[in-house]
Amino acid sequence: MIKGRDFVVFSLHQWEDFNISRSTSLEISRNNRVLFVNVPLYRSNWLRGRNNPEFQKRFDVLSNKAPEIEKISESIWLMNPRIVLESINWINSPCLFDYFNKINDKRLAKRIKHAMNELGFHDVIVLNDTSMIIGYYLKELLNPDLYIYLLRDAVTLVPYHAKHGTRLEPKLIAKSDLMVTNSPFFDNFKAKHNPESYYVGQGCNPDLYSDPDGKLPLPEDTVSLKRPIIGYVGMLTSLRLDIQLLVEMAEKRPDWTLLLVGPEDDDFKKSRLHQMQNVVFLGKKPIKEVPAYMKSFDIAINPQIVNKITDLNYPLKTDEYLAMGKPAVATKTTFMEFYFKDSTYLATGSDEYITCIEKALKEDSAELAKERKAVAQSHSWEHFVNRIFEPAIKIMKERSSKQ
């Protein structure tokens, strides 16, 4: 375990998104101080986002109406950098892109150093969660004691990151002091680019998605729904979810209620699902209410569409379903089969989904619920962070012995 150190954490995600970076940072902050750096505004956001509530706080920081550094707890601070980075992903030339990307990183590093000085941070450990473009030069610019790159999910298959991230990520891994990954399927990166690379698994917060005393009340907007309720909670996006699968399942089993909880992209908003009587959309819910919605499900589903992104995407949602003790039916992907084949029902296509759901409804029991919760507990954030710390401690000890 690492204690009493200062960490700087940045990633592709914002603190407000309740993401893996946030959960990891909270766990690290139990014994260390943490500065979490939100992704700065890009020029394109600055020009088009003034009426977007998502960016309002960022504009307040830029205009000095809000502080750049916000104290979250006694040991963790959130930084919204008081800068606007140039939108450069349209640049095709690698040399030209790298030139401007370094300028962006220099501006970001200047703000991070300012925050570190204000907070009294020193000899920092930097944790970069899969941000292979912004942050590419921060190892050189911040000169941390240790620079850790967390590789999770096939982010470079997303078109935006594929353009330059495919080229930059291997180089970033190579120059990192330590690379950790949530998947043994990224072994090619480990073997080719950095000998100090380790598989550390994945984390979740099983205590958040639990109801140990059975007193968690069901949400009022689910109480009158016809059962069984087949539910999904999360972002409803066609990039990751199979709309046609959901349509077919709802058509074939009109006696089931298909409950979808979360914000929708345009494809979902325009889909036939909205014209189906046994499909219910409840929209985005605050994170504190999500466990209650999961509790309302008879069967929890993760109907992923199979593509290069989802096939190697760690299904964190499955851990959350299991933490609630719910039977989970999910699309059969490489990651699902590797991590959850013994604790979930895996299916391909609507017919298999229906068969698995029917089987899960018949088999469910208190004993199975207990087993599912145990699986989720084994994937806690504490275990995840400790597995990152083990090789980090080894590297720092080896360095000390050579001095």
Image: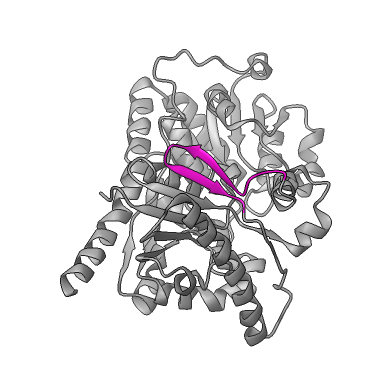
Which residue does the image show at 41% across and 66% down from the upper left?
186
Quadrant occupied by the C terminus:
bottom left
Compared to 316, does 105 lie above or below? Answer: below
Residue 39: quadrant of the picture? bottom right
* Residue 58 colored in magenta in the image: no
Q: Is residue 282 visible?
A: yes
Compared to 382, does 81 lie above or below? Answer: below
Of residues 331 and 26, the one drawn nearer to the viewer in this rendering: 26
Q: Is residue 402 left or right of residue 256?
A: left
Of residues 272 and 125, the one drawn nearer to the viewer in this rendering: 125
Of residues 87 and 62, the one drawn nearer to the viewer in this rendering: 62
Residue 400 in the image: state x and y as whole percent: 20, 68
Residue 70 in the image: state x and y as whole percent: 56, 43
Q: Is residue 24 left or right of residue 191?
A: right
Q: Is residue 346 visible?
A: no
Which residue does the image show at 42% across and 28% down from the upper left?
325
Residue 320 in the image: state x and y as whole percent: 47, 36
Compared to 157, does 18 lie above or below? Answer: above
Which residue does the image show at 67% across and 85% down from the upper left?
96
Q: Point out the stretch of residues depicted in magenta.
A: 65-80
Q: How did the renderer colour the structure? A: one colour
Residue 389 in the image: state x and y as whole percent: 29, 54
Which residue does the image show at 57% across and 68% down from the upper left?
156
